[in-house]
Image (tube, rainbow, N blue to C red):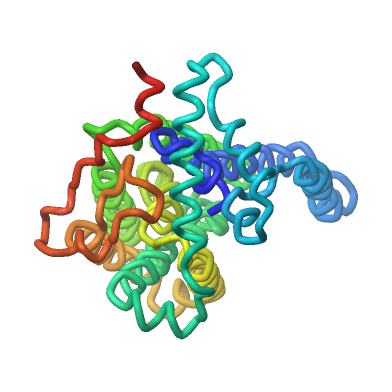
């Protein structure tokens, strides 16, 4: 939400996706640290301790972040908000254009602030259809199984014939693949010919196929071919997730809700998303014992199919639209026809000329 509010409209998809991208920078670094620390006395303690370094760096960097202009306006700190908005515009731009852009952005944000304070009950009363779609999407992002598959990937590989050392190497490769495809998604989601829906649908199909391959092959006798195929299926799944659900979930949620509702909707979506992650991760190993590895990955495949169908019929494409300015409910009229082009009347587009 913070990234979305501070991003120029034409760059919002890429900049908001940076959150997921840098999470995926940290994942392979963490795996690499585990590889390097493995074998030391009490190696697990050193692995946990290594996490304090990036956490400390994040804390220090947060002290230098500017406040959200919308938050400042809400507290009548107009000059500070205007100063931050001006910093979003390139210093190389024509001064007259910069003033027009600043004025327009401030006007849009003030319109949001004119709304009365939104209560939680208002969120459920006024945005029921959009809220249901957004929260279901937040849940689906985790129900397809990404966190559980990623967290237990080393166990999955070892269970199907991969050595412990090689399994850790493959886990590092998973993190690098997820990072690469998240970067790719951030590069294309703001292009008018691509938008949000195409990567979402392509990646959704990839997630479904990846888990389906693992489910089918896991029923076969252990062999080098079986192990290689399972590793490939997991790689396809993780890469597809990095191209679709991973970075696009939070971007789409931020774009679906008008300013007064966005913070509460994003908070609720985050709670649902993390709760689903907790449940799926907690039950993963139990499911593999109760219904076998094949059954567990067939469950993920089923949710993958549900995600693709849900994305096709329910998720709007708001690429380039004014943040919160498009009523997502108005875009949910005809199934399969949601690839709406972004409005051309965007002051930020003038920067291209």
Q: Residue at x 52, y 48 (%)?
A: 5
Q: Residue at x 63, y 45 (%)?
A: 81
Left or right relative to 262: residue 72: right
Left or right relative to 7: residue 129: left
Tell which of 91 and 179 is nearer to you.
Answer: 91
List the single residue furthest toward the right.
Answer: 41
- Could you tell me if residue 89 is visible in this image? yes
Tell which of 289 and 344 is nearer to you.
Answer: 344
- Could you tell me if residue 222 is visible in this image? no
* Number of numbered callouts drawn: 0
Q: Position of residue 30 (x, y in %)?
A: 69, 43
Left or right relative to 141: residue 6: right
Left or right relative to 244: residue 82: right
Q: Residue at x 50, y 54 (%)?
A: 110
Q: Position of residue 257 (x, y in %)?
A: 39, 62
Q: Position of residue 129 (x, y in %)?
A: 28, 74
Tell me if residue 347 comes above or below residue 232 in the rendering: above
Question: Dividing the image into 4 quarters, which one contains the C terminus?
Answer: top left
Q: Residue at x 62, y 47 (%)?
A: 164
């Amino acid at each position: 939400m913070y990234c979305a509010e501070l991003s120029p409209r034409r760059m919002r998809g890429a900049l908001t996706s940076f959150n997921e991208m840098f999470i995926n920078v940290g994942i392979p670094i963490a795996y690499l640290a585990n590889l390097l620390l493995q074998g030391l006395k009490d190696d697990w303690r050193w692995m946990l301790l290594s996490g304090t370094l990036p956490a400390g760096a994040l804390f220090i960097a947060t002290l230098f972040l500017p406040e959200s202009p919308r938050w400042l306006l809400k507290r009548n700190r107009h000059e500070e908000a205007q100063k931050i908005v001006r910093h979003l515009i390139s210093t190389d731009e024509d001064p007259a254009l910069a003033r027009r852009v600043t004025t327009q952005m401030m006007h849009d944000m003030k319109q949001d602030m004119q709304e009365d304070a939104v209560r939680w009950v208002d969120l459920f009363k006024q945005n029921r259809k959009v809220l249901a779609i957004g929260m279901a999407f937040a849940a689906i992002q985790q129900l397809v199984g990404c966190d559980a598959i990623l967290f237990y990937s080393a166990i999955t590989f070892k269970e199907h014939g991969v050595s412990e050392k090689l399994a850790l190497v493959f886990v590092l490769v998973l993190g690098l693949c997820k990072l690469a495809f998240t970067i790719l998604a951030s590069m294309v989601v703001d292009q008018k010919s691509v938008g949000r829906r195409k990567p979402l649908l392509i990646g959704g199909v990839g997630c479904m196929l990846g888990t389906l391959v693992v489910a089918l092959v896991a029923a076969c006798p252990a062999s080098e071919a079986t192990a290689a195929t399972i590793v490939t299926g997991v790689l396809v799944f993780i890469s597809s997730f990095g191209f679709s659900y991973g970075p696009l979930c939070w971007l789409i949620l931020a774009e679906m809700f008008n300013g007064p509702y966005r913070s509460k909707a994003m908070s609720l979506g985050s709670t649902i998303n993390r709760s689903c992650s907790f449940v799926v991760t907690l039950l993963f190993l139990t499911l593999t014992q109760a219904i076998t590895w094949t059954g567990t990955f067939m469950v993920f495949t089923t949710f993958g199919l549900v995600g693709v169908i849900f994305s096709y019929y329910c998720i709007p494409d708001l690429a380039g639209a004014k943040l919160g300015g498009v009523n997502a409910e108005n875009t949910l009229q005809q199934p399969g026809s949601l690839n709406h082009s972004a409005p051309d009347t965007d002051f930020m587009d003038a920067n291209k000329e």
